[in-house]
Image: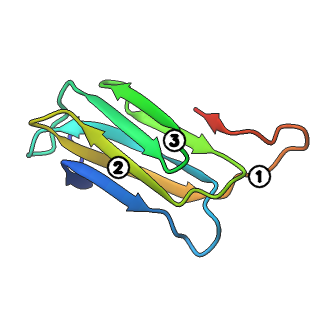
């Protein structure tokens, strides 16, 4: 599988979709310069301090929260590129009594 998306050594994304962003999800993977996945830990961090480390072949992660997210950073080890694909931005539907942050 090759990933064709935005690639950089460290990606810093500003989350703005016209409405407050309270849900994001996507595939996050370290790749070689040609887009082929590389075995490396990818760290996905939100502006509130929430972080998740993914090791290939696990690449999908999603976040929901009631507090709007302003930015996220995607980083990985030396010699590989932080890459994201199938990226989704939206708003979480609040369920009464279940108003906490989730990582899935």
Question: Are the two marked residues, 3 and 1, in contact with CB atoms closer than 8 angstroms?
Answer: no
Residue displayed at 18% across by 39% down:
31
Q: Earlier in the sequence, mark 2 or mark 1?
A: 2
* Image mark count: 3
Residues packed near mark 2 inside 10 Å, few (<14), some (14 to 19) or many (20 plus): some
Residue displayed at 27% across by 46% down:
83
Image location of residue 12, percent across then percent down: 34, 56
Q: Which label number is shown at residue 49?
A: 3
In the displayed structure, does residue 31 sit left or right of residue 66? left
Quadrant of the image containing the N terminus: top left
Say if 2 sits above or below 18 in the image. Answer: above
- Please name whichever residue, 98 or 45, is drawn nearer the observer in this view of the structure: 45
Q: Which label number is shown at residue 52?
A: none
Outermost residue, right direction?
96
Q: Earlier in the sequence, mark 2 or mark 3?
A: 3
Q: Secondary structure at mark 2?
A: strand
Image location of residue 80, percent across then percent down: 14, 38
In the displayed structure, does residue 20 sit left or right of residue 15? right
Question: Are the two marked residues, 2 and 3, in contact with CB atoms closer than 8 angstroms?
Answer: no
Q: Secondary structure at mark 3?
A: loop
Q: Secondary structure at mark 1?
A: loop
Image location of residue 4, percent across then percent down: 23, 52
Question: Are the two marked residues, 2 and 1, in contact with CB atoms closer than 8 angstroms?
Answer: no
Residue 1 visible in the picture: no
Residues packed near mark 1 inside 10 Å, few (<14), some (14 to 19) or many (20 plus): few
- The residue carrying mark 1 is 93
Residues packed near mark 3 inside 10 Å, few (<14), some (14 to 19) or many (20 plus): few
Residue displayed at 32% across by 24% down:
57
- The residue carrying mark 2 is 85
Q: How is the image coloured?
A: rainbow
Q: Earlier in the sequence, mark 3 or mark 1?
A: 3
């Amino acid at each position: 599988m090759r990933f064709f998306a935005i690639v950089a050594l460290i990606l810093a994304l500003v989350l703005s979709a016209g409405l407050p962003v309270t849900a994001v999800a996507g595939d996050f993977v370290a790749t070689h310069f040609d887009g082929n996945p590389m075995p490396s830990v990818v760290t996905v961090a939100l502006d509130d301090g929430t972080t998740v480390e993914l090791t290939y072949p696990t690449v999908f992660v999603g976040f929901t929260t009631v507090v709007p997210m302003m930015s996220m950073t995607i980083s990985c080890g030396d010699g590989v590129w932080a890459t994201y694909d199938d990226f989704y931005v939206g708003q979480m539907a609040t369920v009464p009594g279940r108003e906490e942050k989730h990582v899935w």
